Image (spheres, rainbow, N blue to C red):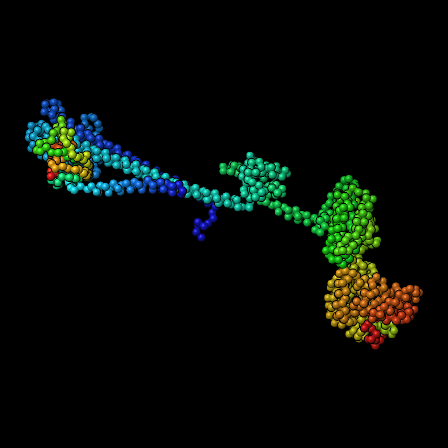
């Protein structure tokens, strides 16, 4: 019993500071809450962005994959009406040639990912760059004022 | 009573926890194995599914290549690939057989896909395969690719038909790959679940086993504690012995010998054993037998403790490997037995051997004497005068005297001789390898030893002893020798006491005669051979009969008329005098009452009965007299008791008891006379204090009154003395007229003797009284 009490004592000494730090971190996140929430829905083979126009500043993107395939989301500055450059396979966008603003790696359906960004005013292209997905129509646009 | 409260130290407490532990292990192991097998089978199946799903990606790419090659005229079969793609997609979704790809692999049997995510992906794959193969077919047939309907929601805006086909192939490949990944993730989840399950099962099993093991340990500890407390609190002594010595001793053993356990273990215990018992204990330790042994152990106080042990051979018992002794300390019992044995063969007062041990030693001595032809001597010693010491100084003083005599005897004899006490004041000595002269010398030393005064209660007490000696060379029996020594001892007493006599056959003859008379006396009393004669007492002044003395007579059928002087001493010594005295009193009272009723005697006629010293001190005389008077309805004043002078004046308790008895009877009205007065040695002054009415002057003085001036003077003096004390004087043994004249001159009141009448049966007295007439009696002249 004495040994058990000793273990409980040590555990308390370790756990209490950790809980304190976690509590502080949560509090910090809440204090920097974004002004705008953008819901991005992905499904075979389209991307829906709501709202399509938002003010500049802190933005939280909520990416929901509705399947059935796995998808990702790449966000780049748009260069107007021009189609983004493709890689040599002719099936995927050459991300390295673009200025990527944010990305969500492969999300299995029905997964949801959140990403926070500070967006300056401008047009942004959002697309899934899995092989053939962009070509099959999985891209959308977000306008930041 | 609840079961838990039961004290069951021998219950198999460990069995349940052990069974529970085994059951727990069995359950958890079975669960673990089943879950592992199940998970393995699922994984095997999923591996097949993943393989097929992954193969779809390759097939989609291969299909595109084959379409392109077919357009160049190469010998390829894109339709077959399309068929495999389609069949595999169906099999993946709905279950079935996925076909082989040109011998690359075997057919793969698949079950229907489970899980919404996976099924959605596989349905999408199926749609994409359809779209892709339709596009491929359009390309081969040079039809419009753009017109091919798309079923998987693709939004293809491409004009290049080949790029269109490649995109569809990429989509198909992609969804196939993701379906395979979904399956792989599912397998990973299952493996994780299996790991968790196995961990939980293992932990639960371990925990349960630990708990049960703990319970088992507690139960074992409790049971061990029970047994330990049973063994340690038991007064029984438990030892475990082996070839290497003592292996275990219970606490009771250490307490008994008052030594530490370490001192006893190993060879320590053996060192404490009595040398006579060591072999028995060692044998028991080596062989496990005999079943019972008794041995002695030395405790720290140097005292030998006797142990009685039950031997149990547990050498083959795995957990003991030794011989167990369950012993009890029986020291007290053995001491008691020894004490009882000692008491059975020794006299408590003096510590000397008693009659039984003496007889035993005598038997052994006679057996030795028979072989060696040496003499054996038996001396029987009776202390003279001891009874007086006992009566006058009390029994404690008597006991001290006996102890002192015993001590002196022990110092006088040799170490090898036996001194025994037979009881009372009778001692016996057994001597071996002696001559007659040795024995006589020893007898003299014994007499000297007894004669040396002993200071008791502040008084010097000196005794004598009568010693009977018998010598034998082994031809006699112990019983005979003791009897002969007894005869010799009585001979010494008869010869004047304080001397020794050696046994001779004539003594035996005399003793035998005495013994014969004693037996005949007893029989005579039963057969009515005794009767009373009466001798009248006459008032000398008037010559009238005023009383009669009852005298006992014995008419033996074998010996004829036996004179009282012959049988009275024997009756006295044997105690028969008490029964005879009772007979005399009863008969005399009845006769006196008879005379009275017949009107033959005056109202004051006194019938006199002789009472012995033994009757006086017996304690029952008063009762006997009252019963005799009551039985005859005789007034106490008409009965007189004649007692001897010595009985009344005796010192000590006996004398006091006699005087007290007489005082009571005198108070009742019974007359008391001193018989044979003048022959004793009593202080005349003492007579004043005695409750007596009459003194009888002994006939020896009376008969000398005519011829011997001294006797005449004594008689006259005694008569005067009686008168001076206010007593009546009676002269016994008057045989002549001259004697009568003298007595009348001396003023003697009453007389008795042949001159008046001999003792005669009651019938003759009746005649005499009838002839004299009742008027002869003078009431006033009788005893007042």
Return the x and y of residue B728 as percentages of the image width and height. 83, 70
Q: Residue at x 43, y 41 (%)?
A: B217
Does residue B391 lie above or below B320 as drawn? below
Quarter of the view holding residue B137:
top left
Q: Is residue B494 visible?
A: yes
Quarter of the view holding residue B76:
top left
Quarter of the view holding residue A103:
top left
Return the x and y of residue B745 as percentages of the image width and height. 90, 71
Residue closer to the observer: B129 or B507? B129
Residue closer to the observer: B467 or A100? A100
Q: Residue at x 24, y 42 (%)?
A: A26
Return the x and y of residue B349 as percentages of the image width and height. 71, 51
Q: Residue at x 58, y 38 (%)?
A: B269
Is B121 left or right of B226, judged from the image as shown?
left
Q: Is residue B510 visible?
A: no
**Count the marks: how many?**
0
Is B434 left or right of A75, judged from the image as shown?
right
For the C terminus of chain B, the quadrant is: bottom right
Is B278 left or right of A5, judged from the image as shown?
right
Residue closer to the observer: B176 or B773? B176
Return the x and y of residue B423 as percentages of the image width and height. 73, 52
């Amino acid at each position: 019993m004495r040994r058990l009490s000793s273990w409980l004592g040590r555990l308390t000494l370790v756990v209490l500071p950790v809980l304190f730090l976690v509590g502080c971190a949560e509090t910090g996140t809440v204090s920097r809450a974004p002004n705008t929430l953008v819901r991005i829905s992905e499904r075979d083979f389209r991307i829906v962005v709501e709202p399509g126009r938002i003010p500049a500043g802190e933005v939280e993107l909520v990416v929901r994959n509705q399947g059935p395939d796995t998808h990702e989301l790449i966000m780049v500055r748009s260069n107007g009406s021009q189609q983004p450059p493709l890689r040599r396979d002719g099936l995927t966008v050459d991300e390295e040639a673009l200025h990527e603003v944010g990305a969500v790696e492969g999300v299995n359906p029905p997964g949801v990912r959140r990403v926070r960004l500070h967006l300056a005013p401008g047009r942004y292209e959002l697309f899934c760059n899995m092989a053939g997905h962009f070509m099959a129509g999985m891209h959308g646009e977000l306008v930041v004022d | 009573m609840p079961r838990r409260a039961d004290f069951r130290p021998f219950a198999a407490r460990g069995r349940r926890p052990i069974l529970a532990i085994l059951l727990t292990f069995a359950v958890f192991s079975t669960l673990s194995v089943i879950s592992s097998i199940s998970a393995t089978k699922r994984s095997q199946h999923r591996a097949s599914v993943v393989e097929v799903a992954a193969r779809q990606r390759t097939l989609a790419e291969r299909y595109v290549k084959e379409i392109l090659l077919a357009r160049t005229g190469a010998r390829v079969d894109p339709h077959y690939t399309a068929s495999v793609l389609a069949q595999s997609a169906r099999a993946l979704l709905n279950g079935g057989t996925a076909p082989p790809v040109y011998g690359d692999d075997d057919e793969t049997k698949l079950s229907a896909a489970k899980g919404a995510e996976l099924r959605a992906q596989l349905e999408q794959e199926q749609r994409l395969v359809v779209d892709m193969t339709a596009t491929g077919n359009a390309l081969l047939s040079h039809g419009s690719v753009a017109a091919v309907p798309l079923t998987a929601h693709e939004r293809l805006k491409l004009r290049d038909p080949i790029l269109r086909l490649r995109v569809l192939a990429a989509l198909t490949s992609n969804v196939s790959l993701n379906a395979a990944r979904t399956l792989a993730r599912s397998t990973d989840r299952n493996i994780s679940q299996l790991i968790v399950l196995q961990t939980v099962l293992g932990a639960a099993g371990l925990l349960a086993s630990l708990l049960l093991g703990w319970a088992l340990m507690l139960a074992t500890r409790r049971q061990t504690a029970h047994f330990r407390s049973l063994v340690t609190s038991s007064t029984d002594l438990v030892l475990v012995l082996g070839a290497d010595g003592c292996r275990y001793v219970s606490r009771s053993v250490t307490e008994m010998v008052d030594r530490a356990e370490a001192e006893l273990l190993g060879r320590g215990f053996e060192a404490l054993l009595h040398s006579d018992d060591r072999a028995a204990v060692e044998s028991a330790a080596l062989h496990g037998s005999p079943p019972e042994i008794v041995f002695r152990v030395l405790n720290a106080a140097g005292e030998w403790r006797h142990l009685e042990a039950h031997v149990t051979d547990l050498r083959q018992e795995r957990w003991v490997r030794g011989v167990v002794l369950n012993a009890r300390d029986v020291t007290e019992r053995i001491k008691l037995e020894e004490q009882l044995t000692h008491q059975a063969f020794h006299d408590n007062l003096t510590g000397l051997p008693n009659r039984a041990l003496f007889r035993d030693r005598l038997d052994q001595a006679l057996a030795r004497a028979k072989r060696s032809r040496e003499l054996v001597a038996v001396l029987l010693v009776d202390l003279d005068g001891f009874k007086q010491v006992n009566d006058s100084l009390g029994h404690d003083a008597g006991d001290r005297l006996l102890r002192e005599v015993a001590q002196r005897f022990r110092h006088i004899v040799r170490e090898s001789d036996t001194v025994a006490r037979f009881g009372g004041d009778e001692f016996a000595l057994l001597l071996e390898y002696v001559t007659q002269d040795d024995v006589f010398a020893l007898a003299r030393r014994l007499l000297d030893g007894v004669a040396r005064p002993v200071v008791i209660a502040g008084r010097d007490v000196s005794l004598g002893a009568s010693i009977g000696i018998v010598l034998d060379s082994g031809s006699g029996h112990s019983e005979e020798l003791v009897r002969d020594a007894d005869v010799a001892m009585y001979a010494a007493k008869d010869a004047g006491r304080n001397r020794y006599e050696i046994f001779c056959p004539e003594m035996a003859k005399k003793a035998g005669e005495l013994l014969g008379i004693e037996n005949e006396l007893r029989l005579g009393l039963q057969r009515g051979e005794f009767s009373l004669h009466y001798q009248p007492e006459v008032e000398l002044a008037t010559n009238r009969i005023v009383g009669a003395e009852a005298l006992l007579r014995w008419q033996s059928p074998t010996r004829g008329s036996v004179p009282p002087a012959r049988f009275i001493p024997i009756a006295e010594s044997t105690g028969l005098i008490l029964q005879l005295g009772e007979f005399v009193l009863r008969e005399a009272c009845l006769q006196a009452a008879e005379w009275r009723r017949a009107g033959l005697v005056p109202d004051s006629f006194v019938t006199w009965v002789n009472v012995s010293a033994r009757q006086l001190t017996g304690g029952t005389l008063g009762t006997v007299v009252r019963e005799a008077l009551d039985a005859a309805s005789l007034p106490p004043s008409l009965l007189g008791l004649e007692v001897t002078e010595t009985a009344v004046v005796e010192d000590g308790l006996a004398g006091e008891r006699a005087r007290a008895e007489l005082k009571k009877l005198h108070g009742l009205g019974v007359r008391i006379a001193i018989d044979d007065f003048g022959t004793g040695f009593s202080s005349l002054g003492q007579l004043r204090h005695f409750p007596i009415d009459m003194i009888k002057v002994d006939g020896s003085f009376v008969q000398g009154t005519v011829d011997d001036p001294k006797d005449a003077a004594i008689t006259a003096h005694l008569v005067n003395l009686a008168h001076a004390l206010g007593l009546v004087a009676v002269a016994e043994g008057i045989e002549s007229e001259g004697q009568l004249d003298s007595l009348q001159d001396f003023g003697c009141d009453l007389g008795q003797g042949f001159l008046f009448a001999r003792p005669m049966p009651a019938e003759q007295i009746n005649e005499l009284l009838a002839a004299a007439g009742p008027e002869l009696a003078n009431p006033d002249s009788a005893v007042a």
